[in-house]
């Protein structure tokens, strides 16, 4: 299990990303912190949320997936994930612009966003 990111460390990483001067490890911390918050908000194993290259989590209660490609997958880049999770971009806008790849009947997680970092 990955090390838990503290609220202070997560918020500091997000502030650095917003300021536009975050090095790669700080951006990784921000992404992982927001994924961690998503897991806390919607625990489960029916949807896999991927933000390559920094992380992936399984969330949302429902049927558990154990092998191969999950049937419900959301994938996006780090900048889009941070924007969605913090509320600076709406799911529909990012999806329309092609910055979210979502497949499966449970893959629309827009009702879980934004998170409250």
Image (cartoon, rainbow, N blue to C red):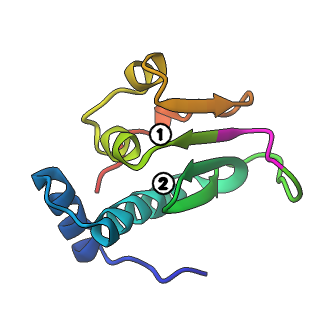
Task: Provide the residue designation for mark 1.
Answer: 112
- Which residue occupies the foreground of this view, 83 or 24? 24
Task: Provide the residue designation for mark 2.
Answer: 38
**Residue 92 image position (x, y, % from top left):** 43, 19
Q: Which mark is residue 6?
A: none
Task: Say which residue appears at 73% left-offset and 39% top-offset.
Answer: 72
- Which of the marked residues, 2 or 1, is nearer the chain's N terminus? 2
Badge 2 element: helix
Q: Does residue 70 belong to the magenta stretch?
A: yes
- Which residue occupies the foreground of this view, 67 or 8? 67
Badge 1 element: helix
Q: Which of the 4 quarters of the picture holds residue 27?
A: bottom left
Task: Say which residue appears at 69% left-offset and 33% top-offset.
Answer: 106
Q: Does residue 65 belong to the magenta stretch?
A: no
Residue at the top extreme, as displayed: 96
Q: Are marks 2 and 1 in contact (CB under 8 Å)?
A: yes
Cα–Cα gap, marks 2 and 1: 8 Å
Task: Say which residue appears at 38% left-offset and 76% top-offset.
Answer: 5
Judged left or right of residue 90, residue 38 is right
Which stretch did the figure color magenta? 69-73
Task: Say which residue appears at 74% left-offset and 30% top-offset.
Answer: 104
Q: Is residue 67 above or below residue 9?
A: above
Count up the numbered dots.
Answer: 2
Look at the image and tell me in which quarter the N terminus lies.
bottom right
**Residue 109 image position (x, y, % from top left):** 54, 35
Residue at the right extreme, as displayed: 67
Judged left or right of residue 94, residue 18 is left
User: How many residues crowd mark 2 within 10 Å: few (<14), some (14–19), many (20+)?
Assistant: many
Q: Is residue 71 above or below residue 52?
A: above
Judged left or right of residue 112, residue 43 is right
- Which residue occupies the foreground of this view, 97 or 44? 97
């Amino acid at each position: 299990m990955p090390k838990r990111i503290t609220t202070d460390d997560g918020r500091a990483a997000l502030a650095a990303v917003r300021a536009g001067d975050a090095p790669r490890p700080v951006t990784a911390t921000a992404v992982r912190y927001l994924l961690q918050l998503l897991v806390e908000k919607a625990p489960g194993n029916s949807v896999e949320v991927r933000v390559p290259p920094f992380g992936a989590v399984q969330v949302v209660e429902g049927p558990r997936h154990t092998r191969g490609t999950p049937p419900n997958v959301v994938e996006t880049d780090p900048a889009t994930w941070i924007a969605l999770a913090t509320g600076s971009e709406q799911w529909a806008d990012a999806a329309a612009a092609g910055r979210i790849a979502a497949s499966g009947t449970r893959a629309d997680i827009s009702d879980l966003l934004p998170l409250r970092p």
